[in-house]
Structure formats: C-alpha cells, structure tokens
Image (cartoon, helix red, strand yellow):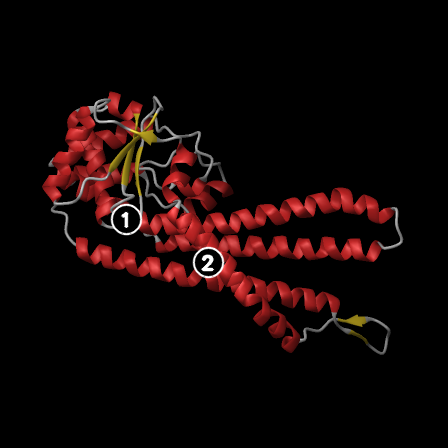
Amino acid sequence: MKYVGLQTQIARNNTKSIMLLLAFPCIMLGMVWVFLAILNWLGGGYYDEYGEVVHTVDIDAVNYYFINAMPWVIGGVGIWFCIAYFANVSMVKAATGARTLERRENPRVYNIVENLCMACGMDMPKINVVDDPQLNAFASGISKDTYTVTVTTGLMDLLDDNELAGVIGHELTHIRNRDTRLLITSIIFVGIVSTIMSIVVRMLFNNMLWGGLSSRRSNERGGGVSTIVIMIVGVICCAIAYFFTLLTRFAISRKREYMADAGGAELCGDPLALASALRKISGDPGLQHVEREDVAQLFIVHPQKFASGFMDFFSSMFATHPDTAKRIAFLEQL
C-alpha cells in the first residue's frame, strides 16, 4: 500500500493547529466569564417576602468586569504561549531527559536517518537520544530548525537496521505531515491550564490550612470564608477548562499514527520490519519516567499503564494512539 495524501494531511494539520489556537482562548475566556458570573450569583441577590435570600446574576455587571479582565487574560495567555512555543525544544528535553546524539557516538543511526531523508527529499532533523535500556522513539519540533527525532539507547541496541529504519521512517513521516507542530500546540495548551489549576489548588490548600486558622482567631470569619469559596469556584472553573482542553485531543486523529506507520513502511521499504519493531517496543516501552502525559503522547508507543474498569475506559477515550496490535495488523496487510 503506497503512502498517499501527504499534502492533504499537511493541510488538515495546519487547519487543526489554527482551530486549536482559536479554541483555546475561547475556552479560557469562557471560563473567566463563568467564574465572574458564579461570584456575582453568590454575592448578589435579595430577600424575598419570607426573608430568604434569592440569588440573581447581574449580567451587565458580569460583562463589565469580563470586558475589563479580557485584555489581561488574552495578554497573559499569549505571552505564556509564545514563551512555551519557542522554548518547546528545551521543554521536551527536560521532560524526557534527552540529549544530543553525536555522529561519532552512533554513525549507524545518522546513516539511516540521512538515507531516509534523501529518499523522501526532506531536510535532516536533529537527532537526540535518551539513555534508557527500554525501547521507544518520538519526533518533536515546530520548524526546520527544531525538528528532532529522539530514540532510546535500548531501541538502537535491540533493533536491527531494517526495524530501526522503519521506526525512524515513522517519526520522519510525523515531521513531514506536521503532526509534531499540532502536538506541540496541544501540549502547550494543556500545560497552561494544568499549571493554573495546580496554582489555584495550592493557594486554596494554603488558605484553608493557614487562613482558616487565623480566621477562627478573629472576628472576620466572613472574609476568610469568602476567599475559600472564591478559590473553590476557581478550581471548578479550571477543572472544566482542563476537560475541554483534553477534548482538543479529539482534533488529533488517531489516523495520524496509521498514516505515519504507512509512511515509515514506504520509506524503509519493509512494512514487516516496522511491524516487528512495534511488537518489540510494545513489549518493553521505555520512558516510563516521563511524568507528563501530554509529552508522552509524542512516543511511537505510549508507555502509559491504563487502570482497570472505568479509568481504563476514560483513559482510552482520550488516548491519541490506536491499539498497537491493530497497527501491527495494518502493517502486515500492506
């Protein structure tokens, strides 16, 4: 089966990247509006004829504060995104423990990458290595200057030349299709929301631990309770925003892995070699030390160990990789 549709896939990934760039600020601004509306509902209202408080939302007041907050939210997220976008190389390196692989250290890998790049007419990416006896690989980067193929030492040692060529061809196809640009954008978005959520949770914990103690020693209990309520509302809004950013993974079709497998099989000229490599990698995928799930989605075989029951269903629902056995069966049919 010949690999086709490269330009179509590139166009689709470019479109999805733009959609993510537009969707994320909308999610953040939407949660800010909800946050302000809930606070207005909690703080506003009137007493009915029975003396009970009836909460209402002053839409005009909410919109006023929202319009004033909008430039700060957009500006803050924009600056954060730009810093993370241009620092993605160091970010991925720090998360995976990767380092630059010198040609003299492993000329075999360099020769394989060079031959495959010449075969498909692309510029040669950087090559990194992770000192891990287990097997895995991934591609990363957003431009010609940052495109990188990373392999583990275990992968280089335990795969033969044909199998290694298949894996590297798979990663080069991700770069050609600009899958890596789309994935890096997704990683940055999820990282921003998760960081904000962790900060708010920590502030809430500290306030409940220390602020609660001090409020009991004073007569200003109302202020302490109000702060805690505000933070709880903030945590809820951040959690909702995080959930919606996870939904953006659905924009990253699992078909991209099948297309990368097909592209890798075509480049190396041996679909069965890539199938054999995937079988070996799935039996001992490395990089389990990587704690960031968003970065782990870059790997050729996801090292995540799913929990049983409901968590297994939940994790698989948001998984960006199809089942490895299905990928192997697909390659064996080529």
Q: Quarter-wise, where is residue 93 in the image?
A: top left
Q: Is residue 24 left or right of residue 259?
A: right
- Residue placed most toward the observer, 154 or 61: 61
Badge 2 amino acid:
Gly
Name the secondary structure under disc 1.
Answer: loop
Nearer-the-camera pick, 238 or 312: 238
Check whether the beta carbons of the residues at disc 2 and disc 1 lie within 8 A of each other. Answer: no
Location of the N terminus by quadrant is top left
Residue depicted at x 68% and y 73%: 57
Q: Amino acid at mark 1?
A: Ser
**Residue lying at 25% horizontally and 24% vertically, measured from the top left:** 156
Percent x, y for residue 229?
72, 56
Q: Position of residue 296 (x, y in %)?
A: 39, 39
With 25 as the anchor, is 17 left or right in this view? Answer: left
Label 2 residue SS:
helix
Q: Is residue 143 above or below residue 305?
A: below
- Marks counted in the figure total 2
In the picture shown, does residue 283 fall above or below 215? above
Residue indicated by mark 1: 143
How many other residues sit within 10 Å of disc 2, few (<14), some (14-19) or many (≥20)? few
